[in-house]
Amino acid sequence: MFNRGNELLELCENKKLPIWELAIQDEMESTGAEREEILQKTAAAWETMKESFSADDERPTMGGLIGGEAKKLSLMDGEKTILGSAANLAMQRAMACSQHNASMGRICAAPTAGSCGIMPAAISTAAERLGLGDEEAIRAVLTAGAIGKIIVVNATVSGAEGGCQAECGSASAMAAAAITEMAGGSPRQALDAAAIAFKNIMGLICDPIAGLVESPCAKRNASGAVNAMLSADLALAGIESIVPFDEVVEAMYDVGLELNSRFRETAKGGIAATPTGQALAERILK
Ligand code: SF4
C-alpha cells in the first residue's frame, strides 16, 4: 500500500485517515490478517512494552555495566530536575527497559532489542501527559510501525549495518511520529517529527563495550526517548523539517553504509575502543 513517506502522506490526505489506520489497512493487505487480529497483536506488543519498564529488575545484567539507573532517576523530584517530570519519567522507563533487556528479560524489539526502551518510554509518557489510555497508545504503536516499515524498506534498522543512528535513531523517529499523531498532530507533522528525530541522531555510531548491549546503549535509549518528545513538540508547534522524511531516511542509510566497520557493532571503535572500554571488555570477556 505504501513504501515511502510521501506515498503514506498522499494516502492519508486522500482518504482523510490517520497513519495508524493506514498501518492497519496496509498490514491487512500485505498479510491477509483480519483487522481484529492485527489490533490484538499490537495490544499484546504494547503490554510487553509496559511490562518491560515496570519489571523493577534486580537481576544482574550480562556484563554488569548497567543497573539501577531507573531507580536513581525515580528518586529525584521530577519537578525539580532540569528537564522536568515528563523527561525524567521517560528516561526512567527507557533505562528500565534497557536493563530488563540486558538481564535477559522479555522485551518488545521495537524495532530492535538494543533500542527497546525508546518507544515504550516516549509513548507511555506522552499518553499520561495527554490523559490518554491504552487504546490511543496501541494506535501510536501502529503509527510507529508504519514509520518503521518505511525505514526497513528503504534503509535499515540494524546497528551492524547502519550504526546506532539506524537502531536508536529509527526507534526515536518511530516514537516521534507516534506521539505527534497521538497528540493530535497531522500525518505531515508526524513525518516531520520523525525526520527531525532522525536528523538529531544522524551519524551516531554503534560502539557497545565488550559487544554487549549495555553501554553506551542504555543512556542512548534515555536520549532517544527525550529526542522523540522534543521532535514531536517541534512538529506540533508547526516547525517543519526542511528536508522531507524520505530524503532523511536515504541520507541516514548513506551515512550508515559509509561507516567503517569499526563503528558498526564490532566493538572495535568509539566508546568500545577507549582504554576504559577495552579494560572493561577484558574483564568481562576473560
Ligand atoms: S550502540 Fe549499537 S548495540 Fe548499542 S543501542 Fe546503539 S546500535 Fe544498539
Image: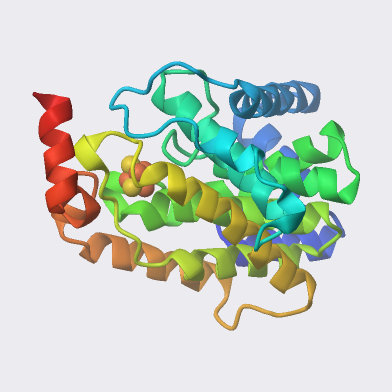
> What x and y, as percent, mark residue 106?
51, 18
Q: Residue at x 25, y 49 (%)?
A: 207
User: Is residue 234 something that shows in the picture?
Assistant: yes
Residue furthest to the bottom in view is: 242
> What x and y, as percent, mark residue 270?
21, 57
> Between residues 25 and 20, which one lies in front from this camera angle?
20
> Between residues 51 and 158, which one lies in front from this camera angle?
51
Q: Is residue 273 above or below residue 82?
A: above
Name the side, left or right, on which 259 lies relative to 94: left
Number of residue marks: 0
User: Is residue 158 something that shows in the picture?
Assistant: no
| Ligand number 1: quarter of image | top left
Q: Quadrant of residue 284?
A: top left
Q: Residue at x 53, y 25 (%)?
A: 107
What colour scheme does the image use?
rainbow
Tell me the quadrant of the picture where the C terminus can be found.
top left
Name the side, left or right, on which 246 lies relative to 234: left
Q: Residue at x 76, y 62 (%)?
A: 187
Name the side, left or right, on which 258 lies relative to 85: left
Residue furthest to the right in view is: 131
> What x and y, as percent, mark residue 127?
81, 44
> Between residues 47 and 128, which one lies in front from this camera angle?
128
Q: Quadrant of residue 215?
A: top left
Q: Is residue 185 above or below residue 175?
A: below
> What x and y, as percent, mark residue 5?
60, 62
Q: Residue at x 69, y 29 (%)?
A: 46
